[in-house]
């Protein structure tokens, strides 16, 4: 009788195992299809169209501008800036050489902001002279510098807008 009880108890367990495999298999198929769909969605937006290529152009005041192929943005190069850093609490003064470029959405925006470039450079110079060497340490310091310059350029050229600030050279000595 004990042998019959073991056989009866084993039968319901065998029926439960295939259901578990079906549930796990269905979940795996859903995850794979979701991943494939996400991959297709993300890769469709990054493929360049035919005929897209980067090309260089010169702006009206002689600054170089380069159009990016993938982002369709224009780059407006500013002249290098050399400023004295604030030397509060330091024995020796420090200098910073900074070369930046402005990323704008299109060529019309680049032309529209050119008359305001003196205001932009003035805003940059005033801000940069108040920085200390310690303000520029590490990647967090450079990130704060980038965000602050972006804010100041957008205030100076309002209602126009710069998409991003690109650092070409940062030298602190």
Image: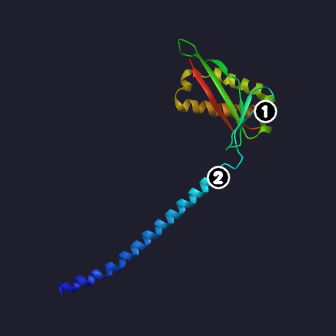
Residue occupying image coordinates x 54% and y 60%: 36
Establish if 38 lies above or below 56.
below
The tally of labels here is: 2
Res 159 visible: no
Q: Relative to 35, say whether 82 is above or below.
A: above
Distance from disc 1 to disc 2, alpha carbons, whole Å, reads 29 Å
Q: Nearer the viewer, residue 92 or 48?
A: 48
For image coordinates 70% across by 33% down, the residue present is: 102
**Display coloring:** rainbow
Viewer-proximal residue, 18 or 142? 18
Residue 149, x across and y down, in percent = 66, 30
Q: Quadrant of the N terminus?
A: bottom left
Few, some or many residues within 10 Å of mark 2 (<14, 14–19, 20+): few
Q: Nearer the viewer, residue 139 or 87?
A: 139
Which of the labelled discs sits on residue 92, or is there none?
A: none
Q: Quadrant of residue 3?
A: bottom left
Q: Residues within 10 Å of mark 1 (few under 14, many from 20)?
A: many
Give percent across and percent down for residue 44: 63, 54
Check disc 2 and report the residue beneath it.
45
Nearest to the observer: residue 44 or residue 132: 44
**Could you tell me which secondary element the residue under label 1 belongs to?**
helix
Earlier-in-chain disc, 1 versus 2: 2
Find numbered disc 2 in the image and state the secondary structure of the residue it sits on.
Answer: helix
* Quadrant where the C terminus is found in the figure: top right
Q: Are marks 1 and 2 in contact (CB under 8 Å)?
A: no
Disc 1 designates what residue?
Answer: 113
| Position of residue 133 in the picture relative to residue 152 (left or right) | left
Q: Is residue 59 above or below residue 68?
A: above
Q: Is residue 29 visible?
A: yes
Left or right: residue 165 compared with residue 136: right
Which mark lies nearer to you, 1 or 2? 2
């Amino acid at each position: 009788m004990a042998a019959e009880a073991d056989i009866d108890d084993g039968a319901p367990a065998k029926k439960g195992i295939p259901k578990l495999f079906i549930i796990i298999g269905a979940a795996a198929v859903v995850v794979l299809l979701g991943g494939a769909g996400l991959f297709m969605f993300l890769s469709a937006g990054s493929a360049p169209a035919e005929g897209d290529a980067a090309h260089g152009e010169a702006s009206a005041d002689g600054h170089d501008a380069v159009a990016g192929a993938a982002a369709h943005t224009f780059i407006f190069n500013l002249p290098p800036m050399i400023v004295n850093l604030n030397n509060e609490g330091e024995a020796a003064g420090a200098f910073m050489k900074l070369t930046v470029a402005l990323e704008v959405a299109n060529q019309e925006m680049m032309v529209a902001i050119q008359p305001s470039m003196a205001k932009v450079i003035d805003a940059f110079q005033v801000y940069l002279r108040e920085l200390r060497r310690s303000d520029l340490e590490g990647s967090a310091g450079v990130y704060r510098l980038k965000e602050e310059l972006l804010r100041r350029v957008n205030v100076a050229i309002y209602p126009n807008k710069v998409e991003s600030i690109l650092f070409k050279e940062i030298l602190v000595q």
